[in-house]
Image (spheres, rainbow, N blue to C red):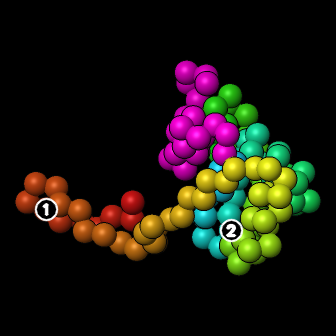
Amino acid sequence: MEENVELSPLVRQFYELKSENPEALVLFRTGDFYETYSEDAEEASKILGITLTKSSVRKDKDGQLLRLAAFPHHALDTYLPKLIRAGKRIAICEQIEDPGVKKLVKRGNKELVSNN
């Protein structure tokens, strides 16, 4: 990984999970889609026959535009068996809180509204 590459929190989390589970193809639920990135995206696109594309803004660990492949979340029952039949181990990452919900954050004696 290049020293000066600024990774988004999602991409950083992907690489952390991938390093802990190098044998697994990592699927991230992002809104209405399951996305996979980098080499996992290349594998998934070949196995599933889905489009391999590049992010217009997110960078990979080498500073290149991040390769990604995605499918609608409601199609998991269709795509997951194909990946398993291809001999892949799968790690599924689900979002556990709504990123659009505003939360109160206490800073000293002030309460701030945050979207983070």
Q: Is residue 88 magenta?
A: no
User: Is residue 10 found left or right of 22 in the rendered image?
Assistant: left
**Which image quarter is the C terminus in?**
bottom left
Q: Which residue sits at x=40%, y=74%?
A: 101
- Quadrant that contains the N terminus: top right
Pointer 2 local density, CA inside 10 Å: few below 14, some 14–19, many at least 20: some
In the image, 54: left or right of 51?
A: left
Residue in the foreground of this view, choosing between 4 and 1: 1
Can residue 51 be seen at all in this image of the molecule?
A: no
Q: Tell whether 103 sits left or right of 67.
A: left
> Callout 2: helix, strand or loop?
strand
Mark drawn on residue 43: none
Q: Is residue 2 magenta?
A: yes
- Magenta stretch, residue numbers: 1-24
Q: Position of residue 81 (x, y in %)?
A: 78, 65
- SS for dot 1: strand
Amino acid beneath label 2: Phe
Q: Position of residue 69 (x, y in %)?
A: 78, 55
Q: Exactly how many numbered labels are in the figure?
A: 2
Q: Which residue is mark 1?
A: 110
User: Callout 1: 10 Å neighbours few (<14), some, many (20+)?
Assistant: few
- The residue lying at 79 percent from left, 57 percent from top is 83
Residue sitting nearer the eye, 47 or 7:
47
